[in-house]
Image (cartoon, coloured by chain):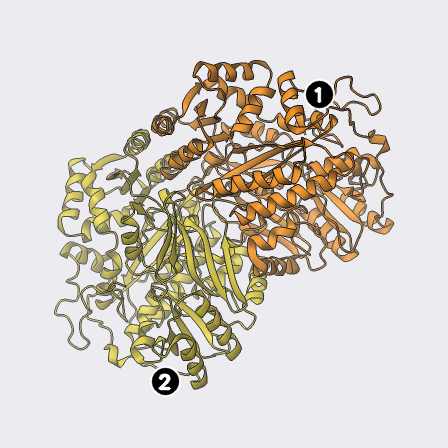
Chain colours: A orange, B yellow
Amino acid sequence: MPEQPELTVQGWGPGAPPAAPGQGATDPGAVLPRAARRHLTEQLGWTPRATPPVAVDDIRLAPSRLPDDVRTELAALLGEEHVRTDRASRLRRAGGKSYLDLLRRRGGDASDAPDAVAWPAGTGETAALLALCAERGVVVVPFGGGTSVVGGLSGVDPDDRPSLAVDLSRMASVADVDVASSLVTAGAGVRGPALEAALAGRGLTLGHLPQSWEFATVGGYAATRSAGQASTGVGRFDDLVAGLTLATPSGVLELSSPPASAAGPDLLGLALGSEGTLGVITEVRLRVRPLPQATAYEGWSFRTWAEGLAGLQRLARHDLLPDVVRLSDPDETRANLLSATGTGARLLRGALRARGRGGGCLLVVGWEGLAPLVRARRDAAVPVLREHGAVRLGRQVGESWRRHRYAAPYLRDRLLDAGLLVETLETAATWTALPTVYDAVRRALCESLGAPGKQPLVMSHVSHGYATGASLYVTVLADRDDDLPLQQWLTAKRAATDALLAAGGTLTHHHAVGADHRPWLEREVGPLGVEVLRAVKQRLDPRGVCNPGVLLPD
Amino acid sequence: MPEQPELTVQGWGPGAPPAAPGQGATDPGAVLPRAARRHLTEQLGWTPRATPPVAVDDIRLAPSRLPDDVRTELAALLGEEHVRTDRASRLRRAGGKSYLDLLRRRGGDASDAPDAVAWPAGTGETAALLALCAERGVVVVPFGGGTSVVGGLSGVDPDDRPSLAVDLSRMASVADVDVASSLVTAGAGVRGPALEAALAGRGLTLGHLPQSWEFATVGGYAATRSAGQASTGVGRFDDLVAGLTLATPSGVLELSSPPASAAGPDLLGLALGSEGTLGVITEVRLRVRPLPQATAYEGWSFRTWAEGLAGLQRLARHDLLPDVVRLSDPDETRANLLSATGTGARLLRGALRARGRGGGCLLVVGWEGLAPLVRARRDAAVPVLREHGAVRLGRQVGESWRRHRYAAPYLRDRLLDAGLLVETLETAATWTALPTVYDAVRRALCESLGAPGKQPLVMSHVSHGYATGASLYVTVLADRDDDLPLQQWLTAKRAATDALLAAGGTLTHHHAVGADHRPWLEREVGPLGVEVLRAVKQRLDPRGVCNPGVLLPD
C-alpha cells in the first residue's frame, strides 16, 4: 500500500504544523490577509491572540482498560502486530475532527480515546472480532479516516465498557473491476485518492469528492451516507453503492442486487447510514463511470441570494442542474473576496469589478461528461441563469475553486490557533422551505453567539441540488469564549438545530448523526422510527457493543 | 371521484368480456391472426380449444368468517356503508392477476377471498382499524388496484384467521402540490390516470407507467417497489417517493425528508417494498416533473440479441440511455411480427423488409424532456446504436408501441380461453451476467414445459436499463395441461427461478415477492437479512396480522 498522509492528532493535516505550544506566534492573525483580519476583528469583536494547542506529549491519556485475556484472544485472531494499546495508536484514533473534538484534543483531553486498536484483514476476521467483543463486553468503534465532524467516534457507552477501535486500513483492496457493468469492489478502508488512482488506470472514476476526500474511506462514506462536491451530478454515496458487506456480532450480511430489485424492503439502505451501530462495513460494491471526456467549470454572480436560489430551483425543475453547483450567500461571497489570497482571489475580484458587481452571490458550476452533452446541458442552463440576473465571471473562477476545494479544514487549524470559534453545520430542505431554513439558522446562530460588540460571521452556501430541494452548508466564525468554549458552541449548535428542524430542514444532509445529533433523531424519524432502528440493532447487536452512544438516542 | 374502470373477477378488463361459459367460441384461436395461430399450434403442439371460465355466479365462496362483534366495531369506526361482506365485494378482492390467480378464479375457486372488505377514509381510520384487527386477531390485506401478479393478495395465514381486505379507494386525494419543489401528496388509492389528470392541469407529470397503469394505485406501487415503462428515464417508483405515511398496528410512521438526508439508515426504503406486511401505506409524497416539451419515440432493429445488449450496455456506461428502452429478443420480435394486426404490425413488417431484415431484435426507444436536450441525447446515442449494427425503423414503429403499451393483459384473457398457458416473469442482472441469466431462464422453461411435440414459446425483452445492468422480462406461452394446470406452471416457475438466481439475477426486478416468490427470499437477502426483516415486522406488527403469508418465508 502506498504511503498515505495522516491527519494530525489535534487538527487536520498534514499541512503546516501548528505553532509549538509556548512558542507562540508573533502575529496570530497572520494567516489571513489584512483586509479579512480587519473585517473579522470589527464584526466579531475578535482580538487575534495565540491560543496554541498543548503539546501532543502533554495530552492526558488513561491507561488501556482492555483486559489482558481479551487482548490475547484478539492477538491470536489477528496476529500480535495487529492489536495495539500504545499511546500513539490510541491517540491517533481518539474522536474525529469536529470543533468539539479539536477543542478537547487541543486542550489535552483524550478521554474518548479507545483502549486499544485492532486491524482485521477482512470480513471473516472482523466478524470473529465482533463476536468475541460481544461475548466479552468490549465496545467496537470502526475507524476509517477519522474525519467525522459529528462525534461519530466520540460516543459514550452508558455501561462504560472498554473500547476497541477497529482500523479499516488493512481492508484496502480494489478488486473485481467489471468495466461492462461499471462496478468495482473496494475494501472499506480504501481512501478516495487510492481508489481514483486504481480506477484511472482503467479509464474509470468514482467521482465522490467530499472535502474529507484525502483521508476519508469508502467504508466511512457508506456508514454516514456521505455526499461529495459533485453529488448533484454523480449522485450521493448512497446512489453509488450497489452492494456491501456488513459484519455484525450476529453474522455477516451480504447485501447486493445490482442493478435494481423489488425483492422486499431495501436492506442495503439500512446498512448505509448505520454509523457503526449495527456492525462494521467491510466491503462495498461501487458504481463507477468513465473518466469525463470534457469538463467545464465556471463562475457566475447573482445579485441576490433570493435570485440565486430561484435560478437554481428553475434549473432543478427542468433537470438542468450542472454536476457541480455551489451558490454562496453574500456573507460567504464577501469572505471569499476578503480572505482568499493569490491568483484565485485576484481573478474573482477583477471579474466582479469588471461587471459592476461589488459582492452579490458567487455561483460555481461545473459540467462533466461527453463533450456534446456538456455543451448541450450548458447551453440549456445559461439562459436560465441569465433570466435570473446572473452574470458570467468566467472559467478561471471555476477552476480556482476546483484547485482549492479541500483547503478549508487546513485553514481552520490556523484560525483556532488565533482564538476563533470555527465550525460548520449543514442541512437540506425543499426549494420552498429553503429560504425559511436559511433565515432561521442564521438568526439562531446570531442570537446565540452575539453579544454587545460581538457578532458571529455566518456564511452559507448551497452545495447539492436536487429536483425537490437543496442542501445548505453553514460556516460559523466567532470570537471564542476561552473560558467555556465547549458550552459556547453547544448552546449555539442546539439553537441552530432546533431552528432548522422547526423550519423544515433535515437534521443532517451529509455529515450524519453521530453523538452530536442523536438527541434530535427522534424529531427526524419519530419515536416509532427510532423503535424500528432499535429493533434492527437488537437483532444484529444484542449486547450493544457496536458504537454505543452514536446515532440512537438513549 | 370520477367513474373508474374495474378489472373483471376472472381476468383483466374491462375489455371484451370472456365468452360465456357453455356458450363456447366457434373458433377458439380467432383472437390471433392466422399466421400466429399456425406458428403457435406448430411450436407449442397446441390445439386451439374452448376453455372458458366458469360463470361468475358459479364461483365457490365460503361464508364470511368475520365475527359479528368485529364487524360492528369496524362499522362504528368507519361507518356502516364502509364495511361489507357481500359476495361481489369479496369476490372482486379475491387475489390478484397472476396466471395462478386467474386459473383459480376461472375454475370457480375463490378460497383466497377476504371475509370482508373495509374502506377507511384516511390514516387515522386505517391506524385504528389495524389496532382493532391486531387485538381481535383479524388479518389485514391492503387492496389497491388488485393487479399483483406474484400472489401479493393470496398469502395464506398459518393461523387461518378471518381476513379483511382494506380497500384504498377512499384515500384518493391529490393535494399539497408544491410546484417549486416538484412535490405532490397523493392518497395511497390514487390510480395513474387520475393522478396524471390532476397533475396535467398544473403542467406536471409523474411519468410512472407500468403495464397495470390503468388500475394500479400509488400505494401499491410503493408497497411493491414498482417500475414503469419509462423508469429508465424518470426512475423507479422508489426514486419518485420523497416520503410516505405507513399506518401499522403499533402506530403511524411518517417518513419524509426531501430532498435528501444523512440522518441514519433509510427507513423510507424499509416501508417501500413491505407489501402490506408492516401495515398499510396510506399516503405518498411524490416527486413530479414538468410535462415534457418534446418526445421522440422510434423503432430500431439489431441483427442479434448479443449486439443489442452490447449496444445498450455501451449507452448505459456513458449515461446515454433513452428514457424508454425496450429491446426484444428474436422470439419476441418474431411473435410481434406474427401476432400484431393493424397498422402497427404492417408498418413494422414493412420497415424491416425495406431494410432487408426478416427478424432480428426490435428496439423501441423514447426520449422526453426539453427539446434541445432530447435532440442532443438522441444525437449522441444514435452513432452508438449504428456502431452495434442497428438500423432505424422510424418513428411510426415507436409510436405504435406507445399506443398499444397496455394491451398485453387483455389479450391474455383471450389466450387463456383458447387453452394456452400464458404467464410472465422478470428479473434483473448486471450487464455482465445478463446473457447468462437469459440463457438459463430460457433453458429452464423449455426443459420444464417441453415434451415430445410440444415446446413452449419463451419471449424476452429488456425494459429497464441502468448503468450497471438491466431488467429482463419473459413471457411464456405453452399448451396448457388441462388436468394439472397449476402444477404445470408451478414446476416451470420453480425451475426458472432457481435458474435465474443461480445465474446471478435478482428474484424480482419490479413484480415484488408476494406469496409466489417468498420461498426464495432467503436466497436473495440471506438468512440474517430475513431475520432483520422479521425483527422489524415483530416491532410494528407483533400479532402478525399484516398480510401474513406474503414476502417473509415461514
Evaluate if marks 1 and 2 touch, with contact meaning CB atoms under 8 Å apart. Answer: no
Left or right of A30? Residue B372 is left
Q: Nearer the viewer, residue A29 or B385?
A: A29
Q: Position of residue A42 (x, y in %)?
A: 65, 24
Residue A17's image quarter?
top right
* Mark 2 nearby-residue class (10 Å; few <14, some 14–19, many ≥20): few
User: Which callout, 1 or 2, points to the residue nearer the camera?
Assistant: 1
Q: Nearer the viewer, residue A359 or B80?
A: A359
- SS at circle 2: loop
Q: Chain of mark 2?
A: B
Residue B444's image quarter?
bottom left
Q: Quadrant of the N terminus of chain B?
A: bottom left
- The answer to whether one can see residue A510 in this image is no
Amino acid under label 2? Pro
Q: Position of residue A166 (x, y in %)?
A: 72, 43
- The answer to whether one can see residue B58 in this image is yes
User: How far is mark 1 from mark 2, CA to CA?
Assistant: 86 Å
Left or right of B468? Residue B312 is left
Q: Chain of mark 1?
A: A
Amino acid under label 1? Gly
Where is A400 relative to A313, above or below?
above
Q: Position of residue A63 (x, y in %)?
A: 87, 43
- Disc 2: which residue: B63
